[in-house]
Image (cartoon, helix red, strand yellow):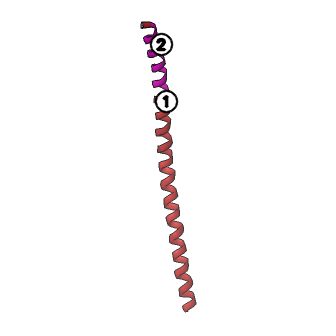
Amino acid sequence: MSEIEDEYQGKKKDYDAIIEQMEAEKEQITKDMGSQFQEYKEAESKFHSNNVQADIFETFQKRI
């Protein structure tokens, strides 16, 4: 029984180390994605704002 318990504890320790490493990588990716996603949303907002401004400008030009 103790041999099996020792083997289990060794494999559990390896498993926990891998899970911890994967969680750290996931956290880093999420952090990186967060800043890039925010930049994307800002760029998209500017794009739509510029399109609206261009439409307004065209309308004023037509009136003139």
Label located before the other in sequence (2 or 1): 2
Query: Spatial distance from mark 2 to mark 1, Cα to Cα?
Result: 21 Å
User: Quick one: SS at disc 2?
Assistant: helix
Residue lying at the far bottom in this picture: please name it: 64
Q: Position of residue 14 (x, y in %)?
A: 49, 21
Residue lying at the far front in this picture: please name it: 1
| Location of the N terminus (image quadrant) | top left
Residue identified by numbered label 1: 21
Residue lying at the far top in this picture: please name it: 2
| Type of secondary structure dominating the magenta stretch | helix
Q: Position of residue 12 (x, y in %)?
A: 45, 20
Residue type, label 2:
Glu
User: Quick one: SS at disc 1?
Assistant: helix
Between 8 and 62, the one nearer to me in the picture: 8
Q: Residues within 10 Å of mark 2 (few under 14, many from 20)?
A: few
Q: Position of residue 34 (x, y in %)?
A: 47, 49
| Location of the C terminus (image quadrant) | bottom right
- In the picture shown, does residue 64 fall above or below 23? below
Magenta span of residues: 3-18
